Image (cartoon, rainbow, N blue to C red):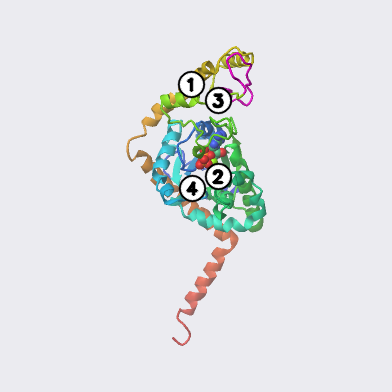
């Protein structure tokens, strides 16, 4: 446990019993509001969020400022509220309990930008340029590497350290960013005094789930995702259109299971291992068609998604999610201000400001001779 958590600061202004527990370590993670959550989120991070919601004081960011890295047009910004609603509904549908966890919208906590600014001298440009997923994001968005994109991990460090989180459940593309957070926390503590915990990455069941294209990671903005909120006919259509083994021309051609996204999804979401192994054997031997395997995958996915659709509906009344986001944002704002107070004090700014203020007051103000 971090020294800060053990000793100071009540977790938040929250008055429910869970958050009032000062010994629960904190957890932060979240998503960019660029579209609905998908199967990749479920196995990369969402299942861990659900599992850890009792043991940790959990905060989930709707990271709209991070959207500006690659999706910054006014019409994309105008989608934030609708996408935020979708994200939070998806997360609740997957099993998060709104009474136990906090959701917030990053842009409603502008103090995080100040924190990110104060962190900038703790990391080198060279270090950030070496992170491969940033280059991929720039390439996928068709844009040049912006200052915002290069600084993505620094702002993410501010998100995590603003609530002094100790656990960060994320997918593999995010591991390198959490490493930057750890470095920033370490350097800050060494240079200015112990304020931050060094947060741990909590790795997902499947660190990277491939997309329906069988090529790149499943991603909201790459058009290769099965959304948790997709209706059953859409799931069926997407599965039936999935890429499989490109060298397999007929059902009697021996097929490849490894690297085949249909089997990757069966491994990730199927519970009946014996049936899946039997299908793999028949596939390798050229004794089952793609259609039969895909039909079974549809069944497996439906058994996962249908309960989520039902749970999601229970929170869908207008205003429910929006109230959660507004209240959560206030809570995180209070917490971030407290972190900034600790940071300014540790760095020496608080002392500077106090001395300045005292001298100004002592002098009585005004210009000489005025
Ligand atoms: P975008 O296309 O806007 O980047 P995304 O689908 O990549 O969206 P993010 O909001 O960037 O989703 O990621 C949210 C979290 O989900 C991160 O922790 C990320 O590592 C994880 N994640 C996203 N896609 C996958 C995936 N295909 N497999 C495993 N984890 C994933
Ligand atoms: Mg992403």
- Residue closer to the observer: 136 or 370: 136
The span picked out in magenta is: 247-268
State which quarter of the image contains the N terminus.
top right
- Residue closer to the observer: 78 or 191: 78
Instruction: Report how far apart the C-alphas of labels 4 and 2 lie in the structure.
Output: 27 Å
Instruction: Report how far apart the C-alphas of labels 3 and 2 lie in the structure.
Output: 31 Å
Residue lying at 44% horizontally and 45% vertically, measured from the top left: 104
Secondary structure state at the residue bearing disc 4: loop
- Residue closer to the observer: 228 or 117: 228
Residue that badge 2 annotates = 165
Q: Residue 47, position in %: x, y?
A: 52, 31
Residue 133 seen in the current view:
yes
Mark closer to the chain start, 4 or 2:
4
Task: Check contact, mark 3 vs mark 1: CB within 8 A.
Answer: no
Instruction: Report how far apart the C-alphas of labels 4 and 3 lie in the structure.
Output: 29 Å
Task: Check contact, mark 4 vs mark 2: CB within 8 A.
Answer: no
- Which residue appears farthest toward the top when viewing the image? 287
Task: Check contact, mark 4 vs mark 3: CB within 8 A.
Answer: no
Q: Is residue 249 part of the magenta span, yes or no?
A: yes
Residue that badge 3 annotates = 265
Residue that badge 1 annotates = 298
Badge 3 local density, few (<14 within 10 Å), some, or many (20+)?
many
Specify the quadrant of the image occupied by residue 174.
top right
Q: Residue 130, position in %: x, y?
A: 66, 48
Mark closer to the chain start, 4 or 3:
4
């Amino acid at each position: 446990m971090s020294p800060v958590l053990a000793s100071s600061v009540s977790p938040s202004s929250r008055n429910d019993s869970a958050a009032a527990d000062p010994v629960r370590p904190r957890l932060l993670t979240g998503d960019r509001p660029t579209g609905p959550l998908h199967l990749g989120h479920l196995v990369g991070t969402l299942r861990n969020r659900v599992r850890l919601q009792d043991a940790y004081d959990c905060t989930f960011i709707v990271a709209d400022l991070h959207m500006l890295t690659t999706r910054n047009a006014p019409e994309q910004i105008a989608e934030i509220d609708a996408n935020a609603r979708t994200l939070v509904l998806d997360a609740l549908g997957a099993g998060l309990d709104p009474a136990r966890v906090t959701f917030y919208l990053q842009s409603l906590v502008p103090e995080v930008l100040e924190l990110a600014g104060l962190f900038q001298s703790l990391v080198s440009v060279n270090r950030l340029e070496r992170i491969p997923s940033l280059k991929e994001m720039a390439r996928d968005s068709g844009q040049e590497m912006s200052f915002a994109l290069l600084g993505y991990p620094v702002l993410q460090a501010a998100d995590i350290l603003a609530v002094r989180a100790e656990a960060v459940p994320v997918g593999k593309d995010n591991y390198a960013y959490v490493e930057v957070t750890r470095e920033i926390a370490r350097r800050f503590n060494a240079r200015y005094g112990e304020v931050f915990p060094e947060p741990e990455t909590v790795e997902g069941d499947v660190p990277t789930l491939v997309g329906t294209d069988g090529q790149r990671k499943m991603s909201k903005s790459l058009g290769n995702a099965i959304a948790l909120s997709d209706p059953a006919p859409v799931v069926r259509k997407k599965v039936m259109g999935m890429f499989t083994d490109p060298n397999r021309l007929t059902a009697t051609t021996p097929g490849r299971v490894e690297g085949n996204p249909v089997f990757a999804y069966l491994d990730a979401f199927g519970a009946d291992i014996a049936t899946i192994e039997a299908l793999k054997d028949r596939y390798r031997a050229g004794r089952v068609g793609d259609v039969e395997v895909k039909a079974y995958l549809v069944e497996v996915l439906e058994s996962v998604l249908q309960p989520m659709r039902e749970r999601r509906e229970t929170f869908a009344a207008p205003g429910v999610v929006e109230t959660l986001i507004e209240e959560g944002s206030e809570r995180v704002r209070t917490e971030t201000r407290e972190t900034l107070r600790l940071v300014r004090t540790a760095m020496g700014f608080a002392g500077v400001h106090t001395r300045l203020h005292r001298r100004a007051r002592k002098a009585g103000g005004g210009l000489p001779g005025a």
